[in-house]
């Protein structure tokens, strides 16, 4: 029915309201009586490539006939679907009016195109994640604020074993400012850090702060994961659908390259230039690839190239290891320096101490800035194609970022486990005692977060804007060499991923971190908007939005799993401090949950114990692995079906050619010589010249339900009636 | 917004929402933009025809090298474009429109001579429009590009792209859906 409808609406003309084809289509509506079918046909009408007037007429004719009620399951499903549709419409309406930063995004899109906008979409999405985390974290600090508690002093019960955890608060104004940046002194006593939440004030209520704390952390991670999945799935689907077998590079570059959203004349002219450059460079790349293949036939040259590649990869691994060691060394030095100079006063010494404390953050930022440049220079020797160069540089930069994070965590871990925090009496040990190690870790993360926030502001205001001003105003001598700043999307996205990791880790140790996260995302948006609109001109070689968004999401997911593993480890295996915090009475943090479970009725208790035991989780993991295997088998089957259809299309083309030749022969014309350029299309060398009789092709695209037949009447027909 | 909303009845808005891929608010926004081209004429007659030159003057279409084709493809008559044609266009270029609809219209836009096939001449015109007037390719480069394109997509080797071939090759093009978008 639907295929016939589309069939009659010929593609050649925009069919007007009164033409024959419309009448024919309208006649077929008489057979439609149920609401369900009507709804389906209405959907098809919407998809028609016809003017609005035609569609309205068709709809009117469709709705004219009598409706028979259908009962039962089908009707119920249809009612549900209608309700869902109206809900979806209302949601779309709401999203359209309430779109955050919508006009800014449109301006940016008009200037730079969809590639850059995808970064801002990612940023807006991270704002949503952080905002949800902020709402959840309110469950921790709001009750504590309401039931204002006494300062944490030693408890009276034997279970709370509290060596003295006292913080010196200085009254010097200068030191107060320094303390804000370091997270020590008066800052350490605030709600920012774990140590504040001893839960004393809530002892009389039934609100168990320890349980709330651990549940909030877990739920934040779960909510982040769910939001990431929803974002990733929609993008991923497009990526899978677009991943073709067979190269379509040229068609993609010609038909998919003009960004219809560009509105600015200047950007449009830049885009024209970049299109020309891209098309030419793509042609050159094809030539380069062919040449390289020719060259590599020679065994000696091939060996040489592979040795070069291996050497370069080893070099890069060494560089990564060296940078990891550098971070470890700097963190160690910084903590040692702080410990040695714990009691200094005097402005310069205190400032120096502050600087040394920020040294790890500065090292990480410096490495993140310098090493990618080295990677770019080095990759030239490996002779890869342009697309692969972009990919592999990206992968290496990602390794660098994740490695620095992991090394930092490792260093903190060793600093924390080295101390003796589990005993009441501080014994002598090779490393000094850290009373309340959670606050200590929170402080280090807090410093990193502050450094991150400042880096964004400084980079935009003090580096990019002046550079652009310099480029525009000064044209003398050395200033001629300065090029305007580029908006480097991969680097910016990796920055975002890195800072998001920090916030996920910091939530456990500094419950107010999500507030900082929300603030940072908003500040980043406005800084980057300033940078993109005022400082950076549109790129000559724009990054393709389509392929990179899902890649970045995958990076975010990997980073998320590393963070959640760390948080899980902290809850499961690390002993909380006995001098501070809501878990000071427990041997491990997760005992908060087990204690609560012990308070449940015995039926629920045994059910819970069964669920978390290996008897259930083991088979569940095996089942999930089998499911993954099944899905991958399904995917490869679909791929081969798609390939089969492509071959079928090609065969139909050969059929048509053969038949045309026959017709020409029968008509007495001389056989047209096959076009010499097109004599041997790639991949068709083994198709038999004597094609079988023409046959109808099943539609390759099920959704359109179009029928194609090899036409004999007109040599031009894509398909003929 | 209240004044604009009273132009359409609820029934009409429902109709438009059922037949396009836009929400009601978006449809009203489209009407607002369209009527700002010539407020008096639109107030007089909702379905007044705007000449092409006025419509292509809006900010979103000004810099587009295919704007005349857009006008030709979406208008129901060569005299000009009505509001409903314009609504059609925005609906096809919206985010929610499925790829099949976009591919249909993309084929018509790139088929300059209107013969239902994208021939080498059409391809030449497309590439010239893409590079702009000052950056045109030489004859040899152009021929090389066209050869490469036809080699990738022309499965029945007839020197032109039929709709089926175009659709087949565009469905594999990852950049198409993200670039074929206009947001008002």
Image (tube, rainbow, N blue to C red):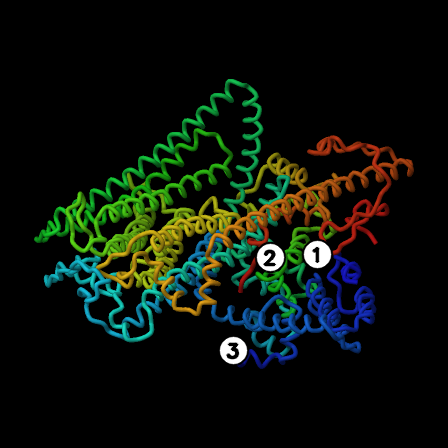
Residue at image mark 1: A703
Which chain hosts label 1?
Answer: A
Image location (x, y in percent) of residue A101:
43, 64
Tell me whether the residue at label 3 lies in contact with that at label 2, contact meaning CB atoms closer than 8 angstroms. no
Image location (x, y in percent) of residue A439:
24, 57
- Decide: few, some or many residues near mark 1? Use Cα within 10 Å; few <14, some 14-19, many ≥20: few
Residue A158 against residue A661 in the figure, above or below: below
Q: CA distance from mark 1 to mark 3?
A: 38 Å
Tell me whether the residue at label 1 lies in contact with that at label 3, contact meaning CB atoms closer than 8 angstroms. no
Q: Which mark is residue B67?
A: 2
Q: Nearer the viewer, residue B144 or A313?
A: A313
* Upstream in sequence: badge 3 or badge 2: 3
Image location (x, y in percent) of residue A616:
51, 55
Q: Is residue A264 left or right of residue A445?
A: right
Image location (x, y in percent) of residue A609:
45, 60
Residue B31 seen in this snapshot: no
Q: Quadrant of residue B17?
A: bottom right
- Which residue does the image show at 33% across and 69% down from the upper left? A208
Residue at image mark 3: B1
Q: Is residue B176 left or right of residue A342?
A: right
- Which residue does the image show at 72% across and 54% down from the upper left? A702
Nearest-to-viewer mark from 3 and 2: 3
Q: CA distance from mark 3 to mark 2?
A: 29 Å
Tell me whether the residue at label 1 lies in contact with that at label 2, contact meaning CB atoms closer than 8 angstroms. no
Q: Nearer the viewer, residue A163 or A223?
A: A163
Q: Is residue A522 left or right of residue B128?
A: left
């Amino acid at each position: 029915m639907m295929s016939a409808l589309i069939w009659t609406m010929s593609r050649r003309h925009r069919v007007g309201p009164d033409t024959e084809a419309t009448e024919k289509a309208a006649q077929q509506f008489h057979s439609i009586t149920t609401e369900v079918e009507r709804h389906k046909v209405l959907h098809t009408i919407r998809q028609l490539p016809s003017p609005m007037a035609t569609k309205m007429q068709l709809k009117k004719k469709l709705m004219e006939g009598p409706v028979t009620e259908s009962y039962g399951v089908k009707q119920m499903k249809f009612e549900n679907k209608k309700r869902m549709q109206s809900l979806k419409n209302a949601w779309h309406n709401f999203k359209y009016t309430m779109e955050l930063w919508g006009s800014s995004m449109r301006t940016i899109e008009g200037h730079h195109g969809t590639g850059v906008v995808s970064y801002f979409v990612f940023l807006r999405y991270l704002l949503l994640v952080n905002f949800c985390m902020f709402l959840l974290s309110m469950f921790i600090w709001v009750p504590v604020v309401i039931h204002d508690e006494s300062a944490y002093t030693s408890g009276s019960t034997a279970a709370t074993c509290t060596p003295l955890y006292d913080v010196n608060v200085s009254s010097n104004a200068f030191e107060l400012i320094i303390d804000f940046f370091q997270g020590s002194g008066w800052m350490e006593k605030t709600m920012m850090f774990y140590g504040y939440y001893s839960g004393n004030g809530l002892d009389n209520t039934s609100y168990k702060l320890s349980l709330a704390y651990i549940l909030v952390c877990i739920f934040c991670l779960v909510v982040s994961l769910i939001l990431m999945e929803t974002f990733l799935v929609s993008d991923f689907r497009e990526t899978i659908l677009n991943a073709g077998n067979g190269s379509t590079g040229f068609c993609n570059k010609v038909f998919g390259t003009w960004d219809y959203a560009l509105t600015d004349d200047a950007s449009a002219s830049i885009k024209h230039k970049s299109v020309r450059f891209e098309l030419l460079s793509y042609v050159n790349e094809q030539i380069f690839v062919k040449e390289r293949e020719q060259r590599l036939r020679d065994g000696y040259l091939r060996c040489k190239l592979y040795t070069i590649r291996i050497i370069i990869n080893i070099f890069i691994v060494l560089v990564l290891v060296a940078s990891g060691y550098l971070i470890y060394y700097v963190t160690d030095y910084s903590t040692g320096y702080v410990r040695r100079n714990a009691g200094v006063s005097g402005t310069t010494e205190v400032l120096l101490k502050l600087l040394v404390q920020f040294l790890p953050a500065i090292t990480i930022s410096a490495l993140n800035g310098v090493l990618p440049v080295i990677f770019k220079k080095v990759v030239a020797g490996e002779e890869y194609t342009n697309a692969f160069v972009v990919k592999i540089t990206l992968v290496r930069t990602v390794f660098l970022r994740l490695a620095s994070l992991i090394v930092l965590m490792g260093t903190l871990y060793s600093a924390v486990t080295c101390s003796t925090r589990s005993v009441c009496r501080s014994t002598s040990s090779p490393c000094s005692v850290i009373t309340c190690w959670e606050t200590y870790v929170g402080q280090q993360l807090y410093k990193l977060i502050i450094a991150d926030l400042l880096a964004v502001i400084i980079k935009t205001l003090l580096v990019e804007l002046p550079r652009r001003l310099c480029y525009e105003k000064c044209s003398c001598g050395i200033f001629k060499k300065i090029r305007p700043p580029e908006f480097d999307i991969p680097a910016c996205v990796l920055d975002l991923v890195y800072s998001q990791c920090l916030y996920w880790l910091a939530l456990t140790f500094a419950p107010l971190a999500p507030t900082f996260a929300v603030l940072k995302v908003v500040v980043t948006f406005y800084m980057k908007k300033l940078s993109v609109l005022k400082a950076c001109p549109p790129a000559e070689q724009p990054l393709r939005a389509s392929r990179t968004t899902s890649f970045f999401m995958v990076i975010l997911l990997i980073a998320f799993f590393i963070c959640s593993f760390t948080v899980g480890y902290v809850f499961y295996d690390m002993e909380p401090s006995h001098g501070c915090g809501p878990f000071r009475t427990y041997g491990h943090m997760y005992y908060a949950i087990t204690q609560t479970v012990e308070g449940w009725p015995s039926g629920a208790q045994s059910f819970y114990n069964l669920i978390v035991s290996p008897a259930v989780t083991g088979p569940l993991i095996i089942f999930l692995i089998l499911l993954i295997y099944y899905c991958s088998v399904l995917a490869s089957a679909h791929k081969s079906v798609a390939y089969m259809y492509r071959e079928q299309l090609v065969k139909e083309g050969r059929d048509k050619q053969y038949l045309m030749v026959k017709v020409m022969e029968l008509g007495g014309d001389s056989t047209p010589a096959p076009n010499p350029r097109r004599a041997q299309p790639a991949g068709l060398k083994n198709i038999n010249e004597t094609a079988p009789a023409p046959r109808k092709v099943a539609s390759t695209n099920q959704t359109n339900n179009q029928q194609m037949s090899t036409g004999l009447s007109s040599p031009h027909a894509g398909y003929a009636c | 917004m209240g004044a604009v909303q009273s132009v359409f009845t609820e029934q009409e808005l429902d109709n438009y929402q059922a037949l396009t891929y836009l929400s009601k608010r978006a449809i009203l926004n489209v009407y607002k933009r369209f009527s700002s081209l010539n407020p008096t004429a639109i107030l007089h007659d909702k379905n007044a025809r705007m000449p092409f030159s006025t419509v292509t003057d809006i900010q979103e279409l000004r810099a587009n090298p295919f704007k005349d084709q857009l006008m030709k493809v979406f208008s129901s008559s060569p005299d000009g474009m009505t509001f409903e044609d314009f609504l059609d266009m925005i609906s096809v270029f919206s985010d929610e429109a499925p790829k099949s609809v976009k591919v249909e219209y993309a084929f018509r836009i790139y088929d300059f001579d209107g013969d239902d096939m994208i021939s080498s001449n059409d391809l030449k015109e497309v590439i010239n429009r893409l590079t702009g007037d000052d950056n045109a390719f030489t004859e040899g480069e152009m021929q090389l590009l066209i050869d490469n394109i036809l080699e990738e997509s022309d499965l029945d080797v007839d020197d032109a792209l039929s709709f089926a071939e175009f659709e087949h090759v565009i469905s594999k093009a990852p950049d198409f859906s993200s670039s074929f978008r206009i947001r008002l």
